[in-house]
Image (spheres, grey):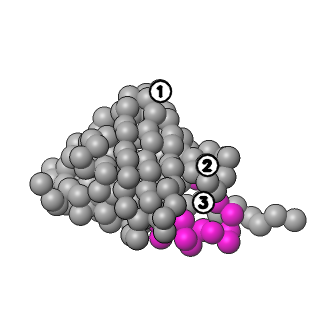
Amino acid sequence: MGSLNVVVRVSRDLPFSCESCFEAWLTEARARRFFFASPSGVLQRIELDPRVGGAFTVVDRRDEEDVVHTGEYLVMERPRALSFSFKVPAYSDDASTVAITFEPLGASACRVTLDAGAVPAEIHDRAVQGWSRVLERAEESLRTP
């Protein structure tokens, strides 16, 4: 019998407007600083076509191996919601859906909540750590001009 699947959901309150937080996911100059970049990896390439039906490709070099991340934008409701399919062919042929909501916390702060769907229980903690790191690095990206 397979392991149970557990939902991966992370959230972070950022001291930036929801508009700024939303746009960071769609602007190559910002996204290259956090979008699927691993702590030890080196971003090799990022291509974003930020529109519903548009695709993205992010290539991160990890231990001399290029890890390709791909997806398609599914929902863009500026500045409240963003959703995309997500696939890492080196690890699985399956795609998941990532949904991100941007909730205003006053005029200059935003709660960013990322729902990465369900994963097998044995990788849940690692997935939560990875997506939490993405949100942490997104905040760092927004702090840097």
Q: Position of residue 24 (x, y in %)?
A: 27, 47
Looking at the image, tell me whether mark 3 or mark 2 is earlier in sequence order: 3
Side of 115 relative to 11 (left or right): right
Cα separation, mark 1 vs mark 3, equals 25 Å
Task: Please indicate whether residue 48 sits to the left or right of residue 119 in the image.
Answer: left
Q: Is residue 112 above or below residue 128?
A: above
Disc 1 or 2, which lies upstream in sequence?
1
Kindly report which numbered mark, 1 or 3, lies closer to the viewer in this rendering: 1
- Pointer 1: what residue? 53
Image quadrant for the C terminus? bottom left
Q: Residue at x 49, y 35 (%)?
A: 72
Where is residue 137 drawn, in percent x and y?
A: 31, 63
Question: x%, y% of residue 124?
Answer: 60, 68
Q: Looking at the picture, which amino acid does disc 3 mark?
A: Val
Q: Amino acid at mark 1?
A: Gly
Can you identify the residue that label 3 sits on?
A: 7
Secondary-structure class at tag 2: loop
Quadrant position of residue 111: bottom left
Q: Position of residue 98 (x, y in %)?
A: 51, 47
> What label sits on residue 5 in the rendered view?
none
Distance between mark 1 and mark 2 Cα atoms: 19 Å
Q: Seen from this angle, which residue lies furthest left?
A: 145
State if disc 2 and disc 1 touch (CB < 8 Å).
no
Per the rendered image, the range of residues in magenta is 117-130
Residue 10 among magenta residues: no
Instruction: Name which of mark 1 and mark 3 comes first in the sequence.
Output: 3
60 horizontally vs 31: left or right: right
As drawn, 30 above or below 38: above
Q: Main secondary structure of the magenta part?
A: helix
**Spatial distance from mark 3 to mark 2, Cα to Cα?**
21 Å
Q: Which mark is residue 89?
A: 2
Using the image, determine if residue 136 lies above or below residue 107. Answer: below
